[in-house]
Each structure stands twice: as C-alpha cells, then as structure tokens.
Amino acid sequence: MTHRADPDYDARRTLELLGPAPENWVPDRPGIDHNVLIVGGGQTGCAFAFALRRAGIGRVSVIDTASDAAKAGVWLNRARMNKLRTPKTLVGPEGGLPGLGFRAWYEARFGEASYQDIDRIPRERWAEYLAWYRAFLQIPVRYGTRLVRIEAQGSHFRLHLDVNGVAQIETARKVLLCNGVAGNGGAFVPPVLAQLPKSLVAHTSEAIDFAALRGQSVAVLGGAASAFDAAATALEAGASEVHLFVRRKTLAATPVSRARAYPGAYDNYFDLPDALRWAQALRFKRSGSTAPPDSVERVTRFENFYLHPGSQWESAREAAGRIHAVVSGESFSFDFAIAGTGYFIDPAARPELADFASHVLLWRDRFTPAEDDRDDELGAHPYLGAALEYKEKVAGSAPYLKDIHVYNPAGFVSAGVPVGDVPSMKRDIPSVVRRISRDLFLADLESHANRLASDVPAEFDESAYAANVWRRETSSA
C-alpha cells in the first residue's frame, strides 16, 4: 500500500520499526488495581499512557469526567482560539517519534505544501489529531469517571471515584494528575462578579452559550488570550457590543518567557537556584500573559468592540435582569459578563486533595524572597520535585506525596513552562515516566533481585561447537 493510499503509513511504519511494547514488568501486588492512575484523558493523559506502555509499565488506567471522547479535553469545548498559541514545530505527545507527530498526520491528509502554509496549528485540526492519536494507539479512557478523594493507605492509595453517578473505590500505587488548569485550585472569578446571579456571569473555563448572546451587550474582564478569544467569539456570534476591561494601562505584548526557551535553560531548569526560578516566575507575572497578535486583530476588526485599558470594576449589581456596573468611576449596563481572569492555585480547594493538602510543600514554605519580590499567588504554588511530584512540608509527615505527580499548571513556578501544555511535553513526560519506573522498580527490589538471579535456560549445548574444538597434536620422540 502506498503512502498516499494509507494516511497512517508513517505511523504504522514507526510502530513497526519501534517494535512491540515490552511486557509489563511490574509485579502484581494483592489488592492493587492500578500501578498508575492517570486523572485526565486529554492530550497529556493519553501521551503518558503511551509513554508508560513503552516503558513496560502495565496496569495503567486513564479516567476522565467527560461523558464521552467528544466532550473530553478543551479543544472542542472551552478553547476558543482559532489557532494554538504555541509554534507548530514543538514536540508534542509523539514523544520523539516523528511518525506519530502532528506534522506527519497533517501532511498525510492535507499535503506538505499545506503544512508549510500554516503558521500555527488550527485548533480544530489539533483536536482531530489528538482523537486520531488516541484511537490509533488504542489508548482506553474511562469516561464518566470523577476522582472524588485520594486517601493514603500505606504504600498505596484508596481512590474514591464517582463512576457515572455510582460510588466506587479502587487502589493505585501512583497517581498522575493531568487534570488541566484548575487541577490544583479553581477558576478565579473576581468578587465583584462572583456576587452576581449565575445566569449573568460565566468564567472562560465554562461552557458558554454564545448564540444566546446575539444582540446582547457583553462585558469581558481580563487581558490575556482567553479573554480576547471569548470577546471575539461573542462578537462573531452577533453580540451588539463587547467591552473588554483590562487593569493594565497597556496590553501585555512582550512574551518574556521566550528568553528561557532554549535547550540549556529548558533542560536544566530544575537545577536552577530557587531565587532564579522565583525571579523568572515573577518577571512573567509582572510582564503579563500576552495574547497572540491574531487574537487582538480578531476583535479589533469589529467596530462594536471597545477596549478599556487601565480600568477597575468598583461595583456591580443586578437590576431588571441586567448588570449595572461602575468601572473607574463610569457607569455601564450589560446583559452578560465573562471573566477571563485566569485561575488560582490552592490544593486545599480541591476536594480530592483535601486529605493531605496541608502537608504539601508550597513555594512560600521553601523560599522567602526580598520584600519587594513577595507574591502571595506565586507562593501558593506547590514546590515540586524534578519529576513534578509533591514534596512534604515536614519530612516524614506524608511520605506518600512523592507518589502523586502534578502534570498541570500548578507546576509553573517549579518547572518554568506551562505544565500540561505542549511546551512541557518533551522534557517532563520522559522525566515523570523515568521516575515512576524507578520508584516501582525499587519498591519491589526483592522481587526483582530474585528475578535477576533466576535460572535462564541455555540456548545451546556443547554439541553445537564440539567438532570445532582445537585438539593439540601429540608426537613421540
């Protein structure tokens, strides 16, 4: 079959050259359901499942709260950008196997010229690629399954699950949190909006009925990409006017994180002194998260889009089904408000983490910056190890924390990249998998020592070479 006739030729050939995945080498333990439970069946959860399979680690389960594959992840649901914000050339879930990467998939379907024509990956094409990746690699995801509570139980965890409304308990030795931007906290809604009726306010992380906003006046709070994307979607849906309010006097336009986007800094980031990692996180926060130029252009082409830089919402109230707000001394009325105001980090706010959140080492516990460099929001981030594992606040108080790996944005201060997004995959997926492999291996060292010392049958006996053994000639004087 030719390449053009089979769009999956490169992927099939890649797996063929790679050879079969190793058999599961992790010894079974009585009462253990999973060696690894992956929470989240999106792009990173599936990438981890494949990487663990190639590492010979079996009994891995992936769960997702979505009812089915179409509703899982953000790309066809809560993501509203036209294109991904990252370069199309970054290594993603393929894990160094080009035949499984986006470019190979895309070119097989749309041609090499088409790939050259795109500057960044179209969001819907990325969603198609991820669906193909999951199906082609046959990665099972258990949909309709929510993690309710992680309960430490000696050398493993009791996992309290809600499976399609039915309570269930399973056990696992390792837990991998691939549960998105709110995985160690939640969506941040400013108090001025939070006290309004829910029917009048939504956060960008929520499903929003933009069609219902046709002919409506909409306020959007926030200056990052998600706020601009929400404003654009409302305008494209026919909103009568959209006002975007930004606290900064000018829009953030300098992507300072690019200063550390080279292999030396990327590969060795966890070895940087804490003071330098803190300074990098603080620099990013103070500079602001930038919206891509095309996201800005997407809204500014509308005459009924109004930008309010340097604005602060002072009050808001509901009257006759509308929002009446005072912003920097000026009065406004809106039909709906959208908070594009990001997320907060607080492990204690997550019910599934509540049992041990007080034991998790945070950056504020580990590092004390100069007075002018203090930042409570950054200080609330967990201080993670090089395999993105939780660490104990007090040594010996919660040794099981090392078996929970945090692959979500709570790792930003520690890792220096938006953990869970494409930029983190090349470095952090192999690092986490290596650590999981090491921990599981050493935890069963006695079993492996016996296996290493076990009898291995000979592949041949002396008869295979007897005829060729040199025999010394003898002679008599």
Image (cartoon, helix red, strand yellow):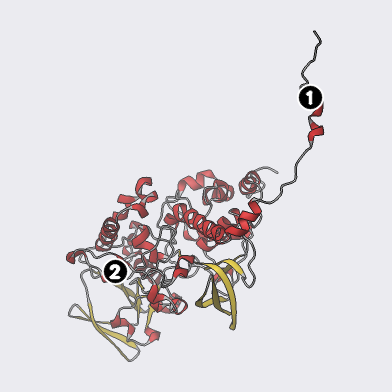
Decide: few, some or many residues near mark 1? Use Cα within 10 Å; few <14, some 14-19, many ≥20.
Answer: few
Q: From the viewer's perspective, tell me whether residue 198 is left or right of residue 11.
A: left
Q: Is residue 161 found left or right of 333 in the rendered image?
A: right
Q: Quadrant of the C terminus?
A: top right
Front tag of 1 and 2: 1
- What label sits on residue 364 in the rendered view? 2
Q: Residue pushed farthest top?
A: 477
Q: Which mark is residue 167?
A: none
Residue, x 25% and y 68% (percent of image)?
A: 375
Residue in view at x 59 percent, y 53 percent: 54
Figure check: 17 above or below 387: above
Residue 229 percent location from the top left of the image:
38, 66
Which x, y percent locates residue 27? 64, 61
Compute the Cα span from label 1 to label 2.
Answer: 73 Å
Q: Secondary structure at mark 1?
A: helix
Choose between 208 and 347: the one closer to the eye.
347
Hey, what amino acid is under mark 2? Arg
Q: Residue at coordinates 51% horizontally, 54% vertically from top-left?
A: 434
* Image position of 397 with respect to 81: above or below: below
Say which quadrant the N terminus sits in. Answer: top right
Amino acid at the residue labelled 1: Asn
Mark 2 residue element: helix
Tell me which corner region of the image, top left, top right, bottom left or bottom right, holds residue 283.
Answer: bottom left
Of residues 10 and 216, the one drawn nearer to the viewer in this rendering:
10
Q: Are marks 1 and 2 in contact (CB under 8 Å)?
A: no
For this rendering, which residue is in front, 352 or 445?
445
Establish if 398 lies above or below 194: above
Q: Which mark is residue 468?
A: 1
Q: Position of residue 308 (x, y in %)?
A: 24, 70
Crowdedness near tag 2: few (<14), some (14–19) or many (≥20) residues, C-alpha within 10 Å = some
On the image, the x and y values in percent for residue 276 come to 27, 55
